Image (cartoon, rainbow, N blue to C red):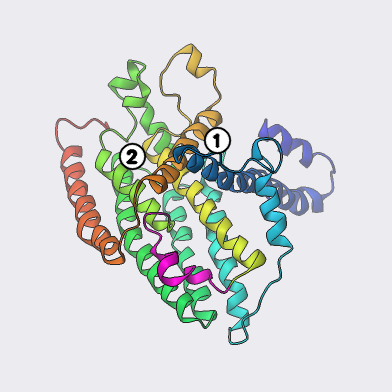
Amino acid sequence: MIDALYNGGLNLLADAWWTTMAWPVLWILIKIVAVLAPLMGAVAYLTLWERKLLGFMQVRMGPNRVGPFGLLQPIADALKLLTKELINPSAASMGLFRLGPIMAIMPALAAWVAIPFGPEVALTNINAGLMLVMAITSIEVYGVIIAGWASNSKYAFLGALRASAQMVSYEIAMGFCFLVVLMVTGSMNLTDIVLSQDKGNMARMGLNFLSWNWLPLLPIFVVYLISGVAETNRHPFDVVEGEAEIVAGHMVEYSGMGFAIFFLAEYASMWLVSILAVIMFLGGWLSPIDSALFNMVPGWIWLGLKTFLVVSMFIWIRATFPRFRYDQIMRLGWKIFIPVTLVWLLVVGAWLFSPWNIWK
C-alpha cells in the first residue's frame, strides 16, 4: 500500500525535476508528518490519561469539566499556554535561553526516525537503528544544561546540574541493556530484534509471549524500565523539579510555549522509552498467542496496546512511590544498576556459548 502511494505520486508528473528531486523530498516530509502528527496527539492525551489514572488511584474523578469526560482538557491546556506571555529574564543569555527547549524536544522527536511500526513500516529501516536511537537521545541532556545555564538563576542552574548528572548516570545502564539485547539478537536493526523474538520452542507451541526477550532477560528488562523512568526525570526520580527544594528545576524561568515545549519533550520521551521497551523485550508488533483470533488484530494495534501498558506503568510508579533523595538516585544508578547489567552481560555471554543457548 505504501509503495502504491509512492508510485502514484511519482507518476503524477513525468518531468525529471519532479521524479528526481521534488517528489522524493515531499514523500519524506509526508512520512515525517504521518509519524509526528499521531505522536503529538498521543503526547497531549498522555497528560490527560496521567491525570485520569492518578485520579482513579487516589479515588477521585480527575479532569471532567472541559468537553465530555474531560476529553478536551489537553486542547484547553495547549491553548492556555499558547496565549501566555513569553517572559524574558533580563539577565538571561537570550539566544541560548530560546535554544534550550528546542534542544530538549528535538532528540525526543528525531529518534522516531528508526522506530519500526511493522515488518517494513519505518521512516528509515537502517541496520544501526539501535545505535542511532541511543546517539540521538543522548543529546537530550544538552537542552537541559543549556536551559539551566542560560536562565542565569541559581535554582535553574542547580536543577540542570542534577538533571544532567542523573541522565548521564542512567544512560550507562541503559546502554548496557541495549548491548545485551544486541548480543542475543545479533543485529542492531530494530525490525530484526522484533522478528528474532518469534522463534524458539515456545513460539512453535503458539505461546509467543514466552519466547519474547522479557523472560530470559528479566533483570535487564527491569533495569531498563527503571532507568527509563530516571532518564525521563519522572517520579520518583524527579528531584530535578523537587518543588519543596528547587522550585521547577531547569525550567523555572520559562513561561508559555517555552514551558510547554519542555513538558512535551518529557512526555514524548516517555512514549519513546516505552516503545523501545516493547520492541526490545515485549515482541513489538507480534501477537502474544499464535491463534486465529489474536492474529486477526493488526500488528500496529498490538504495538500500540503494549506501549500504552508500559507508559501506564510510569504513572503507576508515580502514584505509588515517594521521591528519592538525590544521593539515593546516584547510588542506585552507579552501585546497583551498572554492576547488575555488567554481571548479566557476562551471564548472557556464557549462556550464548553454552549447549543451553535458546537464541540459536
SS label for mark 1: loop
Three-letter amino acid code of the residue under disc 1 = Glu
**Is residue 237 located in the magenta-colored stretch of the structure?**
yes
Q: Is the C terminus in the top left, top right, bottom left or bottom right quadrant?
A: top left
Residue drawn 43% across and 39% down? 310
Q: Is residue 9 left or right of residue 292?
A: right
Which range of residues does the magenta coloring cover?
234-253
Residue placed under numbered mark 1 in the picture: 120
Contact? badges 1 and 2 (CB < 8 Å): no
The alpha-carbon separation of the residues under discs 1 and 2 comes to: 18 Å
Characterize the local packing of mark 2: few (<14), some (14-19) or many (20 or more) Cα atoms within 10 angstroms: many
Q: Is residue 296 left or right of residue 257?
A: left
Residue placed under numbered mark 2 in the picture: 185
Q: Earlier in the sequence, mark 1 or mark 2?
A: 1
**Is residue 233 located in the magenta-colored stretch of the structure?**
no
Residue drawn 80% across and 39% down? 11
Q: Is the N terminus in the top left, top right, bottom left or bottom right quadrant?
A: top right
Q: Is residue 82 left or right of residue 276?
A: right
